[in-house]
Image (spheres, coloured by chain):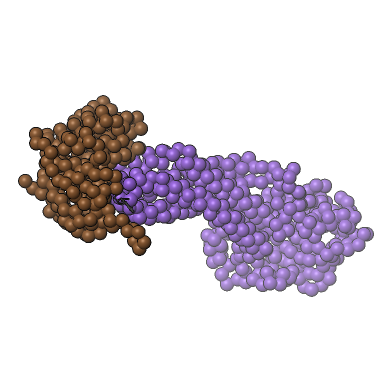
Chain colours: A purple, B brown
Amino acid sequence: MIVRLAWRSIWRNKRRTLITMTSISLGLTIAIFFTALVEGVFRQVVNEAIRMQAGHITLENPEYQTSPAVDLRIGGVENLRRRIEGIEAVEQTKLLIWGQGVANSGAGGVGVMVMGVEPSVEMKTSPLAQDIVAGAYLADSDDRMVVLGGHLAEQLKLKLGSKIVLTTNNAQGQLVEELCRVKGIFRTGSDEIDGYLIQIPATFARRVFGLGDDEATQLGVILKRPGDQAVVIDAITPMVAGKDIAVLPWQSILPEVASFIRLRRTSNGVFQGLLFVIILFTILNTLLMSVIEREREFAVLLALGTPVRQLKGQLFVESACIACLGGLAGMVLGGSLALALQIWGLDLASIMPKGVTISGFAVSTTIHANLTPPILYWIGGIVLGATLLLSFMPMRRITQVHIAETLR
Amino acid sequence: MAKIVEVSSVAKDYGEGGIITHALRGVDLVLMAGEFTSMAGPSGSGKTTLLNIIGGLDRPSSGTVHIEGIEITQLPGTQLSRIRRDRIGFIFQSFNLIPVLTAFENAEYVLMLQNVDKEQRVERVMRVLREVGLEGLEHRFPRELSGGQQQRVAIARAIAPEPALVLADEPTANVDSETGRSLMELMRRLNEEKGITFLFSTHDRAVMERARRLIKLRDGQIIEDTEPRNL
Ligand SMILES: Nc1ncnc2c1ncn2[C@@H]1O[C@H](COP(=O)(O)OP(=O)(O)O)[C@@H](O)[C@H]1O
Ligand SMILES: [Mg+2]
């Protein structure tokens, strides 16, 4: 009977109920859609940054983060990578050799970051290998070849096939000079990467920097699913026991990206919170109005001997119905919009300038949302829970109804 | 015969501090089972106040009220609520039906509060609706019924739980005099056939004439208590 009364009561004022449900569902739609959108951008940037660099999990010398020097390397990498690739959640491992140096051409010299890579692995994993705008990417058999960023090429007035001299110190502390040729030029959209990075084949890099065949600066692990990070770290840690190797999550390798995302999540949360407060006011207003309007009806029900607790129950069910229906509509609408954006993506090239970066990593102009179940159930759950909490305020009014006065 | 209602020295004051209205000034009244009593008096004489206090919808400033021997003025809300549910039926001037419930459901409502099982409920509600002359209109909502029909639903709702006492505050004031007379006929018949005790207030002469006992109220006091004619 409570349910019957509640259900019919909320539809008595159809317009008001629909307005309330609409505001709940629109609020939820916006919240879900934008959260999924922002998460989608984060996922894209993180994914590209990770694949361009050292993966979701990185194995490196424990001191490398604090003082990146070319002699801080790890050994026995081939055996390690074979064992790591045996883990089901692992998509790919990659070896990186990092060093700093100066690139010289006839036009002058520029300080650069030199990244030794395995070309065939990069072709499979790194977005950079797809960003070649002139020439071609490296191949495993290449020697004394480099690919470099567009800005750097301009600065050094380099063209395809141009000569370039790399000057650096090797792990033994000796000065090294190597003559190479430009094989390809990439543009990632990030000024930092395009103006500062040079890639060379790993075998060549080992020779330049004086590393052994089984050594590298980093061993990167790319996962099939980012969520498996902690599990895989736990699986790898015993493999390096006793060795001078740290197993680090990408958040430690790219702390600026991680903290940027944390910051944006917080500000997104604040924005959602404000939206949420507005929705709650609409809901509270509706619930209170509907009780005030029906005070006489409640007085009659009380006069007939209805227990106060039953009337409260009725109001609770009314609030719950409104919240559930509105919430469900919002979750379906927001969820499908986000899902559509996830599947088809949105090309913002016309309104978004190219070259937007997060901590030096380019944001794609085609945005895909990332709708995760927690987004749905957290946002939905908070709205539902808050509505039910709010319903206690109109309930309190019922206990204050004076039957005789109200019925006069 | 059993005492259904016993009102002793009941006074009710409204307002505090500045202007105090003495709505009731020491009312004594006893109603025996099966009585059909009308309370008359000019507007503001205290009729509604007295009915509300007898029905446990309001509490007196002083004095006591016994319903079937139970003193109700000091009872906690939940017990008072149960007495209203089980022992007292209310009929209001402005019908006060639940707009989202049909005629049937309005009459059924208190039975549901009492947890009467479904079969018995349906049987009793259908019988009561027939008795008040609403056969065939069971599934109409209040807004689909005339004023007289709505008041018949209210009467059905009041008597369906088989209360000891029905209190009716100016039950005919919102309908035309023809309808008012037939409502009085109905209540009178229910009183005679089922022995339900009725107490109603009115300032409608036609209504007063149908009462077996007539109480006159003025300025919060009973000034006359007569049995105008016996049947
Ligand atoms: N809530 C109230 N506050 C102040 N005075 C009231 C209130 N309710 C009723 N009264 C006064 O009490 C007196 C009796 O009112 P009432 O019982 O409604 O009379 P009746 O039903 O006979 O018209 C009137 O003078 C009325 O103005
Ligand atoms: Mg009155």
Q: Quadrant of the C terminus of chain B?
A: top left
Q: Could you say which is closer to the camera, residue A265 or residue B161? A: B161
- Relative to residue A326, is residue A250 depicted above or below? below
Q: Could you say which is closer to the camera, residue B74 or residue B174? A: B174
Q: How many marks?
A: 0
Q: Could you say which is closer to the camera, residue A27 or residue A334? A: A27
Does A329 sit left or right of A203 as displayed? left
Toward the top, the furthest residue is B136
Tell me which residue sits at (25%, 59%) in the image. Answer: B61
Tell me which residue sits at (87%, 50%) in the image. Answer: A160
Toward the left, the furthest residue is B1
Does A148 sit left or right of A221 as displayed? right
Image spot of residue A155 (x, y percent)? 88, 57
Tell me which residue sits at (63%, 65%) in the image. Answer: A252
Residue B210 picture quarter: top left
- Relative to residue A2, is residue A86 depicted above or below? below
Tell me which residue sits at (68%, 49%) in the image. Answer: A124
Tell me, yes or no, if residue B124 can be seen here.
no
Does A35 sit left or right of A69 as displayed? left
Image spot of residue A39 (x, y percent)? 60, 52
Does B16 sit left or right of A37 as displayed? left
Image spot of residue B69 (x, y percent)? 12, 53
Image spot of residue A282 (x, y percent)? 50, 49
